[in-house]
Image (cartoon, grey):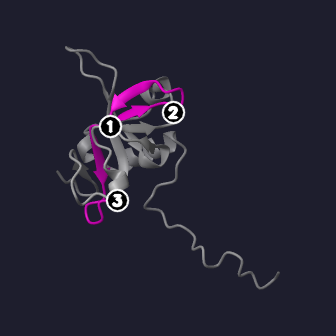
């Protein structure tokens, strides 16, 4: 269940916040086309803060589809059983993927986040308390 950095959660357990209990829901694009079912969440082990949705795109009965880690920032729960993303299936199919999606490395995460034009969540963020406290104004 746990790699060093992220844990793979494949059931809506009580440790997840209510709004994060989306495993088993369907992911839709902005045009309401079904993309995939949310198979699992990749979460921070201590806080259970979700970082990625694990989905499978494409594939058939005899051919496995592509496992994609979709950053949680790009998704929004809109209804019971429904999660939306502005990304189209074709663009998601071109996204980089991890060798083992349930044990993603930091280097793989950087490639994934870069593809989606997101900053790494582990990078320090500027504090909001200094905003508006400029002594020169």
Residue 107 higher or lower than 30, as above or below: below
Q: Is 46 in front, or is 29?
A: 29
Would you identify the image quadrant in which residue 127 lies? bottom right
Label 3 or label 2, whichever comes before in sequence order: 3
Residue ID at (29%, 18%): 59
Asked which secondary structure carries label 2, the reply is loop
The residue wearing badge 2 is 87
Residue at the spot x=37%, y=46% of the render? 52
Q: Which residues are magenta?
A: 26-49
User: Residue 105, percent across and down?
Assistant: 31, 49
Tag 2–tag 1 contact (CB < 8 Å):
no
Horizontally, is 104 left or right of 130 in the view? left
The quarter of the image holding the C terminus is bottom right
Q: Is residue 62 magenta?
A: no
Q: Position of residue 15 (x, y in %)?
A: 24, 60
Total marks in image: 3
Q: CA distance from mark 1 to mark 3?
A: 18 Å
């Amino acid at each position: 269940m746990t790699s060093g950095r992220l844990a793979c959660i494949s059931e809506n357990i009580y440790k997840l916040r209510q709004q994060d209990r989306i495993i088993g829901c369907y992911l839709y694009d902005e045009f309401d086309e079904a993309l995939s079912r949310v198979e699992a969440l990749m979460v921070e082990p201590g806080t259970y803060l979700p970082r990625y949705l694990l989905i499978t795109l494409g594939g058939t009965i005899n051919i496995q589809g592509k496992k994609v880690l979709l950053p949680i920032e790009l998704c929004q729960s809109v209804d019971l059983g429904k999660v939306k993303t502005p990304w189209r299936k074709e663009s998601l199919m071109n996204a980089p993927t991890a060798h083992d999606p349930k044990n993603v490395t930091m280097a793989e995460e950087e490639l994934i986040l870069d593809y989606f034009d997101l900053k790494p969540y582990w990078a320090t963020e500027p504090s909001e308390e200094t905003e508006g406290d400029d002594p020169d104004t």
